[in-house]
C-alpha cells in the first residue's frame, strides 16, 4: 500500500506538468497571434519607429511560440524570418534570410562535427569515464565536477561558446553511460541546464572570459575614471559567481530531482568496467586528441594570433578548422555521414537571431529599455535603490538584447552617465552592472552557449526559463549584496 502511495505521489508532479504543458501547447498559437496583432496594429507610441514596432510585435509573438511550443521551434523561426521583410520590420530580405550564414551557424555545425569525432573515436568516452570514476562517485558529485571544470576553463579559454563546445560532448557521453533519454531524463535535464549556467556564471568571474567584460572595463576606465584591472575584476566578481552557482546548483537539484530516476548504486562499477573495456589508446583517439588539443590552444591564445601569424583566427574559424581536420581523409576519423548535425537547430537559431537583430537594429530594444527606466522614476529614488534597480535592469536586459556586446555597449555608458547625473560613484555601479551581462541564460536564442546545450534535446524552453528566472534573481541579489558590502572592502 505504501509503495502504491509513493508511486502515485511520485507521478503526480509529472501529471501536473504534463497537463500544464499541454494547455500551453493548445493556447500557444492563439495567444501568439493576439500578442502579435495587438502590438502590430496599436497606434505607434511616441519615439518609436514603425519598423521597431513591427520588430517588437514579431519578437513577442515568436517568444510566446518558443516558450509554449505548439509547433516545432524551428517552424516558429521560419515564420519569423518570413514575416520580418513581409511586414516591413527589415528593409532587405537578406537581413532576415542572411542569418543562416552567421558565424554562429557555422560554429554549431563544426561543434557537432567535433562532438561526433570525440564520440566515434572513443576519446570523449575515455576522458569522461576517467573523470567521473576518479572524482564523481555519484550523479550529484558528477554534476559538481562538471561545474568546477567550467569555472577552471574560464581562466584558459576566453570564449563562452568554445567552452560549451568542449563540455557538451563530455556531458553527452556521461549521459549515454547513465542511459539518460533526451526529453525524459532529469539527470540529463539538470546536467545540461547547469552546464549552460556554469558557463555563464564562470564567465562573469573572469575579465578575459568574454569580450563583453573587456569592453565594459574599457568604458569604466575611460568614461568613469576607474582603474579596473584583471585582478580587480576577479576579486570583485568571482566570489559572487561562486556563491550564486553554489546556491543555484542545489536549487537545480530540487527543481529537477534525480532521486526518482533510478538506482545509481552500481553505476560506478559499470563505469569502471566500461573504462577498462576501451583498452589502450587507438589511432583514432590519438588523432582526435591532437585535433582537440590544437583547438583548445587556438581558442586559448586568440589574443596572440595577430602577433604570431599576422592575422587572427577567431572562435568560429577555429571550430571550422577542427571540423575540416576531423573530416579530412587520412588525417581525420570521420566521414560526412558520421557527422550528426541537427539542421533543424540551425533554422531555429537563424530565426532567433533574425528577430533579435531586427529588434536591435530598428531601435526597438533601446526604446523598450528607456521606457522601463523612465517608468520606474529612477531620478526620484535613493542612491541605494538606484543601484538595486540598475543591477536588476542590467540582469534582465538580456530578455530584450540578444547580444552581450550590444548590451554592454548600450547599458554601461548609460549607467555611468546616470550615476554622474545623480552624484553617485559610477565605477562600482557600472562594474556591478557589467557583472550581470554574462547571465544570458533564460532562452535558447539569448546566447550561442544556450543554443548549443539546447540542441541536445534534454530540456525544454520552459525548463530553461523556469530555472533561469530563479538563477538571475539570486545572481542579481548576490551582486547587490556585494555592491553594498564586498566592494567597499575592496576599496571600489
Image: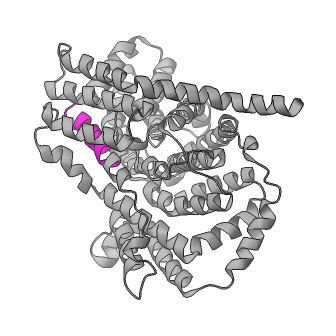
x and y percent of residue 7 in the render?
78, 33
Q: Looking at the image, can residue 409 be seen?
A: no
x and y percent of residue 414 in the render?
32, 31
Residue in the foreground of this view, choosing between 33 and 472: 33
Q: Which residues are magenta?
A: 349-363
Q: Is residue 262 above or below residue 269?
A: above
Q: Looking at the image, can residue 137 be seen?
A: yes
Q: Is residue 221 above or below residue 165?
A: above
Q: Is residue 40 above or below residue 409?
A: above
Residue farthest left in this picture: 91
Question: By what rule are the colours in the image chosen?
Answer: one colour
Main SS, magenta region, reads helix
Residue in the foreground of this view, choosing between 377 and 219: 377
Residue farthest right in this picture: 1
Q: Quadrant of residue 135?
A: bottom right
- Give the quarter of the figure containing the N terminus: top right
Image point 36% across, 36% down: which residue? 412
Residue in the foreground of this view, choosing between 112 and 481: 112
x and y percent of residue 273 in the render?
77, 72
x and y percent of residue 300 in the render?
46, 67
Q: Is residue 31 above or below residue 301?
A: above
Image point 41% across, 46% down: which residue? 447
Image point 14% across, 37% down: which residue? 85
Give the left or right position of residue 486, taking residue 454 as reference.
right
**Residue 143 within the segment the image draws in magenta:** no
Residue in the foreground of this view, choosing between 158 and 79: 79
Image point 60% across, 45% down: which residue? 184
Give the left or right position of residue 344, taking residue 459 as reference.
left
- Please state the total of marks drawn on the protein image: 0
Amino acid at each position: 500500500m505504501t509503495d502504491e502511495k509513493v508511486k502515485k505521489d511520485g507521478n503526480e508532479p509529472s501529471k501536473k506538468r504534463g497537463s500544464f504543458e499541454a494547455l500551453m501547447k493548445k493556447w500557444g498559437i492563439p495567444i501568439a497571434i493576439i500578442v502579435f496583432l495587438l502590438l502590430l496594429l496599436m497606434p505607434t507610441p511616441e519615439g518609436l519607429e514603425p519598423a521597431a514596432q513591427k520588430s517588437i510585435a514579431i519578437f513577442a509573438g515568436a517568444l510566446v511560440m518558443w516558450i509554449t511550443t505548439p509547433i516545432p521551434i524551428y517552424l516558429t523561426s521560419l515564420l519569423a524570418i518570413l514575416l520580418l521583410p513581409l511586414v516591413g520590420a527589415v528593409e532587405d530580405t537578406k537581413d532576415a534570410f542572411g542569418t543562416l550564414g552567421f558565424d554562429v551557424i557555422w560554429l554549431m555545425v563544426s561543434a557537432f562535427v567535433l562532438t561526433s569525432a570525440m564520440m566515434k573515436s572513443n576519446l570523449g568516452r575515455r576522458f569522461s569515464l576517467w573523470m567521473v570514476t576518479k572524482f564523481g562517485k555519484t550523479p550529484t558529485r558528477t554534476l559538481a565536477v562538471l561545474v568546477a571544470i567550467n569555472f577552471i576553463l574560464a581562466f584558459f579559454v576566453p570564449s563562452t561558446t568554445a567552452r560549451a563546445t568542449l563540455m557538451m560532448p563530455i556531458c553527452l557521453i556521461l549521459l549515454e553511460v547513465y542511459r539518460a533519454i533526451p526529453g525524459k531524463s532529469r539527470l540529463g535535464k539538470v546536467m545540461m541546464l547547469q552546464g549552460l549556467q556554469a558557463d555563464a556564471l564562470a564567465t562573469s568571474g573572469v575579465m578575459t572570459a568574454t569580450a563583453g567584460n573587456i569592453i565594459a572595463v574599457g568604458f569604466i576606465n575611460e568614461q568613469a575614471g576607474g582603474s579596473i584591472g584583471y585582478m580587480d575584476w576577479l576579486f570583485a566578481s568571482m566570489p559572487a559567481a561562486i556563491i550564486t552557482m553554489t546556491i543555484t546548483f542545489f536549487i537545480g537539484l530540487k527543481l529537477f530531482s534525480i532521486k526518482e530516476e533510478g538506482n545509481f548504486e552500481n553505476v560506478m562499477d559499470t563505469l569502471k568496467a566500461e573504462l577498462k573495456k576501451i583498452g589502450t589508446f587507438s589511432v583514432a583517439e590519438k588523432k582526435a586528441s591532437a585535433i582537440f588539443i590544437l583547438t583548445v590552444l587556438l581558442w586559448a591564445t586568440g589574443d596572440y594570433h595577430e602577433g604570431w601569424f599576422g592575422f587572427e583566427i577567431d572562435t568560429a574559424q577555429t571550430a571550422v578548422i577542427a571540423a575540416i581536420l576531423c573530416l579530412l581523409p587520412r588525417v581525420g576519423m570521420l566521414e560526412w555521414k558520421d557527422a550528426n548535425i541537427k539542421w533543424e537547430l540551425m533554422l531555429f537559431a537563424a530565426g532567433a537571431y533574425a528577430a533579435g537583430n531586427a529588434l536591435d537594429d530598428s531601435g526597438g530594444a533601446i526604446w523598450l529599455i528607456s521606457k522601463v527606466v523612465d517608468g520606474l522614476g529612477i531620478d526620484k529614488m535613493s542612491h541605494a535603490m538606484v543601484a538595486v534597480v540598475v543591477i536588476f535592469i542590467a540582469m534582465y536586459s538580456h530578455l530584450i538584447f540578444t547580444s552581450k556586446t550590444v548590451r554592454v555597449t548600450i547599458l554601461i555608458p548609460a549607467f555611468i552617465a546616470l550615476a554622474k547625473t545623480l552624484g553617485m560613484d559610477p565605477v562600482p555601479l557600472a562594474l556591478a552592472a557589467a557583472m550581470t551581462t554574462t547571465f544570458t541564460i533564460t532562452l535558447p536564442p539569448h546566447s550561442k552557449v544556450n543554443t548549443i546545450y539546447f540542441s541536445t534535446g534534454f530540456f525544454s524552453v520552459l525548463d530553461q526559463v523556469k530555472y533561469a528566472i530563479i538563477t538571475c534573481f539570486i545572481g542579481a541579489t548576490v551582486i547587490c549584496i556585494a555592491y553594498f558590502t564586498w566592494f567597499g572592502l575592496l576599496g571600489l
